Image (tube, coloured by chain):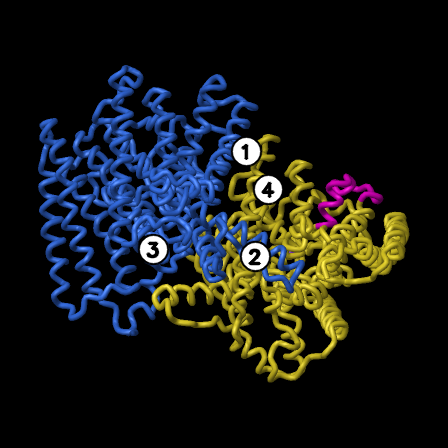
Chain colours: A yellow, B blue
Amino acid sequence: MNVRVSWRYSLSLTGTIVKWLAAPLCFPLLVAVYYAEPVAPFLVTIGVALGGGGLLERLKRLDGEERLGPREALLMVSLTWLLVALVSAVPFVVAGQGTIAHPINAAFESMSGITTTGATVLRQFDIHARSIMMWRQLTQWLGGLGILILATAILSRLSVGGAQLMETETQYDNVDKLTPHIEDTARLIGKLYAGLTLGTVAVLYILYLVGLAPNMTLYNSVAHAFTSVSTAGFSTEPLSIEAFAPVVHWVLIVVMFLGSTSFVLMYFVLQGNLARLRNSEEFRFYLGTVIVFSGLIVTILLLKENPTGTGVSDTFRQSVFNVVSIITTTGYANANFDLWSPFAKHLLLMCMFLGGMAGSTTCSIKSLRWLVVFKAFRRDLFTVIHPEAIRPVRLSGVTVDEDTIRNIYSYTLIAIVGVFFVTVLIVVDGARTGLYLVEGGFGEFDALGAAASTFLNIGPAFGPAGPYGTYDVFSMSTKAALVVFMWIGRIEIIPVLVLFTRSFWQS
Amino acid sequence: MNVRVSWRYSLSLTGTIVKWLAAPLCFPLLVAVYYAEPVAPFLVTIGVALGGGGLLERLKRLDGEERLGPREALLMVSLTWLLVALVSAVPFVVAGQGTIAHPINAAFESMSGITTTGATVLRQFDIHARSIMMWRQLTQWLGGLGILILATAILSRLSVGGAQLMETETQYDNVDKLTPHIEDTARLIGKLYAGLTLGTVAVLYILYLVGLAPNMTLYNSVAHAFTSVSTAGFSTEPLSIEAFAPVVHWVLIVVMFLGSTSFVLMYFVLQGNLARLRNSEEFRFYLGTVIVFSGLIVTILLLKENPTGTGVSDTFRQSVFNVVSIITTTGYANANFDLWSPFAKHLLLMCMFLGGMAGSTTCSIKSLRWLVVFKAFRRDLFTVIHPEAIRPVRLSGVTVDEDTIRNIYSYTLIAIVGVFFVTVLIVVDGARTGLYLVEGGFGEFDALGAAASTFLNIGPAFGPAGPYGTYDVFSMSTKAALVVFMWIGRIEIIPVLVLFTRSFWQS
Ligand SMILES: [K+]
Ligand SMILES: [K+]
């Protein structure tokens, strides 16, 4: 069994995916043609994708065996997110406009897109071609699709941080199977994702047509459907969703919430299987976090003056929107929450660590893991008092394996420790470049927010990198490091870490 | 088996301990007599201890059964640290000098003493009677003794955060047993603790007598022996150990290091069993953290200008001293490390989470737990690649139970999450009282440092609560909350948390 990892085979699979990037690149190309903008950025990138991807793909022939074991799958996943992000950065460099003309900034924006993070280094939005801005939005939609397939088809079959616990078609023996085959599952989930996107476009554009959302043109409807369904968060507007009418905010609250709901669960509900929804403790927990944190923030903002709006209606909409945006890890904003009180901002920071349901486009630690952590911890308290008792942890009625609980604890711990290390990195590099604790620079809380927001793939943070700010305030070295950490965080940390163990490469 | 918790019995045992507090109170009483200072603070407290403790002790007669199960033990531990801290605060209130005349401040100083934290709310040191200052030192020595007995005799026998893994006399079958009885172990460890204290007094006082440490009088020798052996950190000097000659710093580095070394291990080494030391992976890990962090900080301070001293010798001594002080969770300082660079300060913050060896007077998460976390995490990475493999985690050659690994993960996680919650509490209350992010107030990093330093029982933090500062900058409500968190943190969190579960009180 323990033969060498077939890295050529992994690389060739990645090559195939990179090659196929040429297809979605045709969309911004068409947008460019329609608006008579330069087409070179996309033509060049299509060439790079086809050429580079094709070359990598041919490596397969050099490997005797075509074996996709856990190691090949993990290597392929890591390489795919890395290479797709690098190729997706090419249009920004070729277009040569604004901050993202610089290769490191382009890599930041592209990695932020592909990982559905939504952190931006843009300083000016209106200098960029519409086709470039649409490509930026599309990278997030592609990243969301990629993560759905990764989660349901690959990670759930490996013991990566308890991912095997997520809602799957074969989880409960007493429910009808969604479908017996992996590829069919992926296809159904892909269709659901596409359907949700088209539905969002339709609703937003209808609001425009009936005059309820004046600036939600077809272009903007597509652009924001791409980044809400994928809980990704890029906007074409510097003021994010505040640029649009309140009704749009409520529509997007629903879309973000659905984007962070298990797609398998959603499929069952669409099939009329409401028992599955009622049975899902994870869904209740996820909904509970949204309600509790929205309630806390709306109370805080109403008790003290709300610096970003007037009246109960504004405050309520802003609280719910930004809490949903952060918990679902979307990262849109409809108010500059950086102006809120320290208490409210710290609650948002907590929300960053939550995340939505496993098996969705959500990032961060996810409600599944926190729920298991809470249940296991309560069980452990019981066991301290009753050492002789055997009390398994049950999730939605099913006993959770003790190894899985351990994996979930370790994943949660490594994610939190990871955020802390990224914070230190941002602070140390910021102190070196004179940005830390100076007027116009950033403080410890801002650094912590930026670390959590990138490593956990949320998007906006606080201070200069706040919802209406830009990550361009950070030095090139910090931004380069954040590219790496967005990558590691998005694919659930473990796939990258195993690459650095000796046993991964040993036969 | 599942009868009601015998809370009266727990309370009566606590009463006995409180009653016995009268004995150590005689020491500062004698100091007061010697220096002709007021004796009322100690006479009153002796009365409170004998009266209150005696009354509680009589509750036993109301309980039919005298059964010390896990629940009774945990309740007794929680109550003991709480009540002993409250009674120990009485002398400060009765003396009526300075900040600690206020009951909440007195409770803070006393809890900080009993929990061997070493965070102080004193503003002026020289206005207090020598007897009061000696009592303050002695509370820490008593707290250290208490924790040694708690760790080796009680926690190691319950599944509290993997405490059962610590070095014990019966751990390895192939080594001679230290002693077969719990009480004997406790007695031997108590003797070792007393011996180490006397040795420290002797060395420090000899340095004074030969003129190498001009101000290390017998009084100061005793005062600092009390708080170094117990890795507790109170000093009679506002400048902590910087007030003494460099040779004292090196002596205390050794004492702090020993105080955070497993006392069982130390006993074996004194018996000539060096194999046990060579075999201890935890000891190597503990020593390793001290060397690595000292090395990093000395490098940083030498590369950039050291703001607290000149020359390699000063910088080396300051780096090693403060790293040992923080890792052992003592909290002495021989330089105002709050002036160091952000990188160095963040390294010290990391050290706060480390701690020394289990089965010593150390606080924080402890090297035992981190070592198991690292080993288990490396094993889990291996298992991701080789799902079919069974690879147990081994510590010093012995297989670690998977339940214990899970307990250690959960303990580490709850400790880190706890620090984060205390940080938010400090920030929110600080913002309310106008101390957060204002000139002369504290920032996010300072709040994080104060939270870690109190919940993990280190002592000094950064900013206004830095090594030469005072926790008196915080509001009364923050200080009251920190009293609770020092208490919860010192007795390893779980004993207090179980009190809040329903099953604890159910029959
Ligand atoms: K996002
Ligand atoms: K301490």
Q: Is residue A147 left or right of residue B434?
A: right
In the rendered structure, find residue A464 and report the number of the disc placed on it. 4
Q: Which residues are magenta?
A: A93-111
Residue A218 quadrant: bottom right
Q: Is residue A5 left or right of residue B474?
A: right
Residue A35, visible in the rendered structure:
no
Tell me the subunit letter for badge 1: A
Front tag of 3 and 2: 3
Q: Does residue A493 belong to the magenta stretch?
A: no
Alpha carbon separation for disc pair 1 and 4 = 11 Å
Which mark sits nearer the N-terminus, 2 or 4? 2
Residue wearing tag 2:
A411
Residue wearing tag 1:
A439
Q: Amino acid at mark 4?
A: Pro
Query: Mark 3 Cα within 10 Å, few/some/many (few <14, many 20+)?
Result: many
Which mark sits nearer the N-terminus, 2 or 1? 2
Q: As rendered, which of B159 and B431 lies closer to the eye?
A: B159
Question: Which element is circle 1 on?
Answer: loop
Alpha carbon separation for disc pair 3 and 2 = 27 Å
